[in-house]
Image: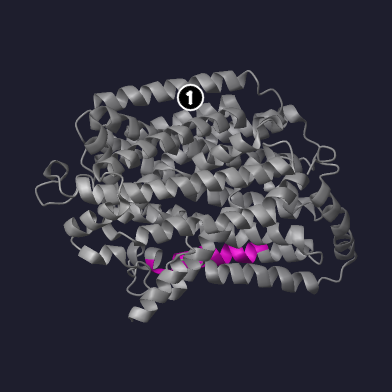
Amino acid sequence: MKGRNSAALALAALVPALWAPALWADALTGEVQRQPLNVSAIVMFVAFVGLTLCITYWASKRSKSAADFYTAGGSITGFQNGLAIAGDYMSAASFLGISALVFTSGYDGLIYSIGFLVGWPIILFLIAERLRNLGKYTFADVASYRLKQKDIRTLSACGSLVVVAFYLIAQMVGAGKLIELLFGLNYHVAVVLVGILMVLYVLFGGMLATTWVQIIKAVLLLSGATFMAIMVLKHVNFDISTLFSEAIKVHPKGEGIMSPGGLVKDPISAFSLGFALMFGTAGLPHILMRFFTVSDAKEARKSVFFATGFIGYFYILTFIIGFGAILLVSTNPDFKDATGALLGGNNMAAVHLADAVGGSLFLGFISAVAFATILAVVAGLTLAGASAVSHDLYASVLKGGKANEKDELRVSKITTVCLGVVAIVLGILFEKQNIAFMVGLAFSIAASCNFPVLLLSMYWKKLTTRGAKIGGWLGLITAVTLMILGPTIWVQILGHEKAIYPYEYPALFSMAVAFIGIWFFSITDKSAAADEERARFFPQFIRSQTGLGATGAVAH
């Protein structure tokens, strides 16, 4: 059994830390006690929101065309884009979730922190450069490059919208619960507030505003986390070994926190979750969109490089913060309730640590930054959803590529408002739902539907529209079906005794179905259209390498 656990853990090292919401799910989905009004936190929060709305106003003056709205006119540098992507990933979920995991389980947290970075080389070496050279606004531009526009764009847009919807639920519920906990505001008020703000960002400022909001949030979160880590290290005279040895003394598990434990129950679940989150990263529409905001492939490569650096640094900090919380929070009775449990659940470990090292003002800062970070992520998701509807479904499928720019933008803005309303409603409906499950579902769908079609359209010359369409839909339907038949929905929500599909996550099987489906239906396609599509691979390959025809030749 121990061997199996160790194997599972080794596999789980593949799992990016973005499944951190799994770790904060319980704390944020249980009953939350509203806290008394935290004035300093609310002042900070209002200041941040005010600043970001000023940015939105500035950006709105510069967002004139569709290119400005979707991709900030390609004016973002590699460094800025890398920081914005990092802001997208370093959500409050990761900040609270990973530090909570370290707080409860010790060393396991490090495995997950490091594991996160595995997905990024895939994007760097396989996708970023070619994506930038081939696309315009969305990844469907790339997937449908040499295939039938209507079929592939419909599939990509549906896959994107499902991913965005589930991801939005996780963020909205998380934001609502955080605010309820930290600011003493009502949950429904908090969710409506997030919904209105994200619509404003996207509606008026488009991608330029969203990018700059994310950059600011990333800088603030990195600064806050760095300060916390320095204060923790100062407490132990900057001696890491003292930090670990002191933590061992006060932690209930003792030395157990320095050895890997069995966080993932079985190897298949570990593999499935690892695949979902490693390859799902390369199928997330709001991340892929970011590569069109830079001017060329060289900047696209740079942005992945910087994003990986910032994210890696951030996860090292969360590890120190987690151990600092063991040392400074778990030993302080002020942060515990009558039963000895941490106020607000274990996921509040980092928030309590902010109070312990920097007092109520710094607590206000961290709380506000944590919330504001969720806002930025939500704005990016909304923009990705709006572009899938307006650019892919409306302009390319309904209008056959003949829509004028003004109409496309109008549809995009209507969609943004609709998505805002949907996000608020879903956030309220799913208040009690397990956030981790939603994120897992979003990533599983991205890995099973978006990623296989995108990868093979760029790399496999025998791909045909029939193969991509049938294989993509099979991957999407398999992922959703297995999710429904799995333990979470079938047993916990629908109340059946035993799950038909025994594992939490479907990606291992649904990805296999997608790839085999795409391969089989492509090689058996003997139509004249299929021969034409295969013949178009070589011109596509030339452009993907050189960027000729994208915006002119590209400097490498």
Report which quarter residue 452 is drawn in. Answer: bottom right
Q: Is residue 191 visible?
A: no
Taking the spot 89% from the left edge, 65% from the top edge, the residue there is: 531
Kindly identify which residue carries mark 1.
52
Q: Which quarter of the rendering shows the N terminus?
A: bottom left
> In the displayed structure, does residue 507 sit left or right of residue 553?
left
Count residues near mark 1 (Cα–Cα under 10 Å), then give few for <14, some for 14-19, many for 20+.
Answer: many
Q: What is the span of residues highlighted in magenta in the rendered image?
A: 472-487
Residue 479 among those drawn in magenta: yes
> In the displayed structure, does residue 163 sit left or right of residue 10?
right
Judged from the image, the secondary structure of the residue bearing numbered disc 1 is: helix
Residue 433 among those drawn in magenta: no
Q: Residue 410, how many percent across, how many down? A: 66, 29
Vertical placement of residue 23 versus 210, above or below: below
Tag 1: amino acid: Thr
Q: Residue 224, how many percent across, how many down? A: 37, 35
Q: Residue 28, how many percent across, how many down? A: 31, 48
